[in-house]
Image (cartoon, rainbow, N blue to C red):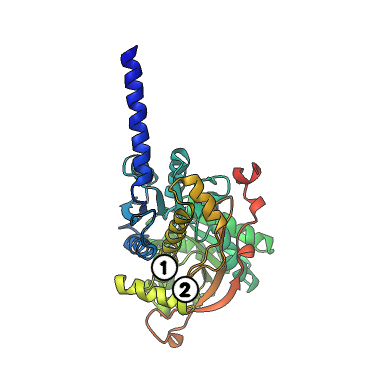
């Protein structure tokens, strides 16, 4: 009996020491994303650079400089959740960020919930992350399928695009984006003429494009992203889809996609973004620093990683602790102000509310410098761009 008591006491001491060590060690941030696949230009190594910039700008946090590590989830939910579990359990990671590919993010958010550790998502788009799958320890920092649907989809319908056919990435993100955009189209009196589901990282879109062409829909909605969007539009040009009178709606496009397409192909496309490098002096100053390290301006995902990490570190400093509950409360209390966000707010459902922007891709003749690709069409206030708090079926909202 005495031996058992001593062993139990020793275990408690060890647990206390581990807890103290976790609290006293440096803040550790894990950038988890696609480092080698179709989303590597969107986030990839550039997101790691952005996180490190935020850490460098923050200086000492709780007396020590924060640490950034990175991992490649390969766009696989099981790989992503396994890395997250190891980071939280064994490697002392306090917060995970980026995590493009909504299916991976939905897996990671469950690990964050279980471990009561923070996840600040900048890469995934599914609005379910702040809806039925909302999590007290997670936030959707940059954008979501609801905002993309309402800003881009709404603008296209208003301009006469009232019949749609969707080419949809066959996983959580694509399904959510088609669902949310379809709701906008139908609410405005438009019609959905059909859709086709496409596996992730498909090289040949010809059969899918032929179905879209045959539908006679005015708008071919691309509910995909990254390399899949690029291939859809490039191959669509080969089929003469735009010349035939149909138009593409790139429902999620990054500046890296436009760069890959070139202005001759991408001109006239309308897209939604929370950030563009050439909007004002602050965005240009950050983007210049980023480009000096990477050779190109940031995507909105990469800019969002900086924003999320910077606000997180600010909240850690303000609360004087790494305790996830206290830090999350502080992040909600503090307004988000940086080069890409003015007076943003983190809601109880994990949604960061910020202004969104509708851009149109310039004609080649309108572009005056490298990466001079967008012209601003409309600024949409955050309260209009994002789903109302009481409409997302988030259990945290229902529970008060």
Between the C-alphas of marks 2 and 1, the distance is 8 Å
Element type where label 1 sits in the image: loop
Element type where label 2 sits in the image: loop
- Residue 197 is left or right of residue 76, and the answer is right
Is residue 296 visible from the viewing direction of this image? no
Task: Point out the image quarter for the N terminus.
Answer: top left
Comes first in the chain, label 2 or label 1: 2
Q: Position of residue 326 (x, y in %)?
A: 50, 47
Q: Which mark is residue 276?
A: 2
Q: Position of residue 261 (x, y in %)?
A: 39, 73
When asked about the image quadrant of residue 84, the answer is top left
Mark 1 = which residue? Answer: 299
Residue 22 position (above or below residue 55): above
User: Residue at position x 55%, y 71% from top?
Assistant: 357
- Residue 189 is left or right of residue 29, and the answer is right
User: Residue at position x 44%, y 88% from top?
Assistant: 365
User: Residue at position x 47%, y 46% from top?
Assistant: 324
Q: Which mark is residue 127?
A: none
Task: Point out the image quarter for the C terminus.
Answer: top right
**For this rendering, which residue is in front, 272 or 117?**
117
Other residues around mark 1 within 10 Å, as few (<14) / some (14–19) / many (≥20): many
């Amino acid at each position: 009996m005495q031996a058992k008591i001593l062993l139990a006491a020793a275990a408690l001491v060890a647990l206390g020491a581990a807890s103290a060590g976790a609290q006293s060690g440096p803040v550790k941030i894990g950038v988890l994303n696609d480092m080698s696949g179709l989303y590597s230009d969107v986030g990839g190594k550039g997101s790691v650079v952005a996180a490190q910039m935020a850490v460098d700008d923050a200086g000492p946090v709780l007396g020590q400089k924060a640490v950034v590590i990175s991992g490649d989830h390969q766009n696989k939910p099981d790989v992503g959740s396994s890395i997250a579990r190891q980071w939280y359990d064994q490697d002392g990671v306090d917060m995970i960020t980026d995590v493009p590919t909504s299916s991976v993010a939905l897996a990671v958010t469950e690990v964050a919930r279980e471990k009561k550790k923070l996840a600040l998502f900048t890469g995934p788009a599914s609005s379910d992350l702040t809806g039925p799958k909302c999590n007290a320890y997670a936030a959707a920092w940059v954008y979501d399928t609801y905002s993309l649907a309402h800003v881009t989809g709404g603008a296209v319908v208003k301009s006469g695009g009232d019949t749609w056919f969707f080419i949809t990435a066959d996983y959580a993100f694509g399904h959510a984006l088609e669902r949310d955009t379809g709701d906008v189209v139908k609410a405005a009196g438009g019609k959905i003429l059909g859709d086709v589901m496409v596996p992730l990282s498909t090289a040949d879109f010809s059969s899918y494009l032929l179905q879209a062409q045959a539908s006679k829909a005015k708008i071919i909605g691309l509910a995909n992203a990254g390399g899949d969007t690029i291939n859809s539009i490039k191959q669509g040009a080969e089929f003469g889809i735009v010349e035939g009178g149909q138009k593409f709606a790139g429902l999620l496009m990054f500046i890296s996609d436009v760069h890959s397409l070139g202005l001759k192909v991408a001109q006239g496309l309308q897209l939604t973004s929370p950030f563009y490098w050439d909007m004002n002096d602050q965005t240009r100053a950050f983007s210049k620093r980023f480009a000096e390290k990477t050779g190109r301006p940031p995507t909105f995902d990469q800019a969002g990683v900086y924003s999320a990490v910077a606000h997180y570190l600010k909240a850690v400093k303000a609360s004087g602790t790494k305790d996830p509950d206290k830090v999350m409360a502080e992040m909600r209390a503090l307004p988000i102000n940086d080069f890409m966000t003015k007076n943003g707010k983190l809601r109880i459902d994990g949604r960061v509310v910020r202004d969104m922007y509708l851009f149109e891709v310039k004609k080649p003749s309108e572009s005056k410098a490298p990466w001079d690709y967008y012209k601003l069409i409309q600024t949409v206030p955050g309260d209009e761009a994002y789903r109302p708090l009481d409409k997302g079926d988030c259990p945290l909202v229902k529970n008060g």
